[in-house]
Amino acid sequence: MPMFVYRGRNARGDLLEGRIESPNAQAVAVWMSAVGITPVAINQSKMPTQAPKWLTEPFTEKKLSDLDLLLFTRQLGSLVRSGIPLMQALTGIQNSTRKEHVIKLLQAVRDDLDRGIELSAALAKHPKSFGDFYVSMVRVGESAGELEKIFGRLHDQLQFDMDMRRQLKGALRYPMFVCIALGIAVTIINIWVIPSFSGMYTSLKLDLPIVTKILIGFSNLTVNYWWMVLGGAGAAYFGYRLWSTSREGRRVVDELKLKVPIFGPITNKTAMARYSFALATAMESGIPLVDAYTLTSKVVNNGFYEERILAMRDGVGRGESIYRTAQNAKIFSPLELQMISVGEETGRMDEMLRSVSKMYQEEVEFEVSRLSQTLEPILIAGLGAIVAVLMLAIFLPLWDMGQITRRK
């Protein structure tokens, strides 16, 4: 993604300069307006294209963890609600933590505030820790003088997202453990067990079944050309990462995730729950609808849904109704469309969206609770099939040899 150098002025007229990665200059201008900076100049940097973020992130500023961000939001909201000045509140939070990267980040935010920069603009300088949604919500709170309410809503949003991720991780822990254990077992058999039988079969000059030949051939490739196998696997992995981080690649991968049996419906419901909750939060906070769609598209963490939500934003920008744009997006069920229509007609869209979010959250919790029961027989059947193939491939020639011996 290209790098842009920008210059602008905040609400106090202070000149601000910085660098930011963005697909184009128009996106930089939109971002600057969202954080309260009036653009003066935006120029693309002539520096060589940087490496992908997933390669460079470990060597740059450390990102706040989900728990750290949740704790920071709750603490800052509580202190602001108590009437404590913002600088004093940030100092108190900074003094209460022992994590070095959190201390450095808060010190950088305080330094920016000392120079007269608004809180939203100061947070926007740390996009890895504070995303567009977070920054825009803070800016709305600054404009309306309701930072304490905004931090409360942000806390609810972060807590909701963290609960969704925790449930999914918990559901996937058992299948991942079984797959890793199976991979280790297959590797041991492939490297040590099969070569032993292969030498014996070669000395006996047996006519081997096709399955045994395939396994022996793969074992020989792994043992004798392990460097080629590792190199090919590494090249495939890095190639996939490069492609999946591109806009088109990410959209294709995320769309395929929605079609995976068992996991696809859970991914779909999780994305819809996050979309509904985030859009309701943005609308309650007074963010313009077009901007709310833009910010919400980044919250769902799914390239396919992001594309559809941005299409909805464009439709609303052209003057179409929310119901019409939602219908054209083709990602909502008839029940959800009916709730959106009722919410739009009654002017209670935020309440309807929260109802949709709660409904999906309950469905995700139910799906996750029975995920282990659904996967257990599938995993057992898969393990049984793999073990059966391995045993047949290894011992079927011995059985044939025994039969020949008996006939003699």
Image: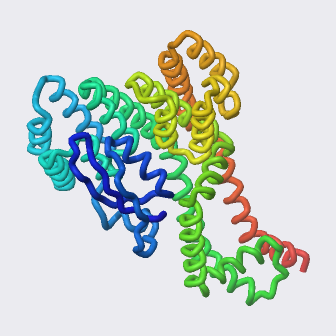
Q: Is residue 74 above or below residue 321?
A: below
Q: In this view of the protein, can residue 394 be seen by the observer?
A: yes
Q: Residue at x 62, y 51 (%)?
A: 251
The image position of residue 112, as x and y in percent, is: 18, 49
Q: Is residue 77 above or below residue 187?
A: above
Query: Looking at this view, is 55 or 380 the one in front?
Result: 55
Q: Residue at x 11, y 39 (%)?
A: 87
The image position of residue 21, as x and y in percent, is: 42, 59
Residue at the far bottom in the pictured view: 203
Quarter of the C terminus within the rendering: bottom right
The image position of residue 375, as x and y in percent, is: 61, 41
Q: Is residue 250 above or below residue 397?
A: above
Total marks in image: 0
Query: Looking at this view, is 78 or 40 the one in front?
Result: 40
In terms of image quadrants, where is residue 142? top left
Q: Residue at x 42, y 63 (%)?
A: 53
Locate residue 198 relative to residue 208 in the image: left or right.
left
The image position of residue 164, as x and y in percent, is: 46, 35
Q: In this view of the protein, can residue 375 be seen by the observer?
A: no
Locate residue 217 relative to residue 360 in the image: left or right.
right
In terms of image quadrants, where is residue 7? bottom left
Q: Residue at x 69, y 28 (%)?
A: 327
Locate residue 77 relative to residue 206 in the image: left or right.
left
Q: Is residue 205 above or below residue 189?
A: below
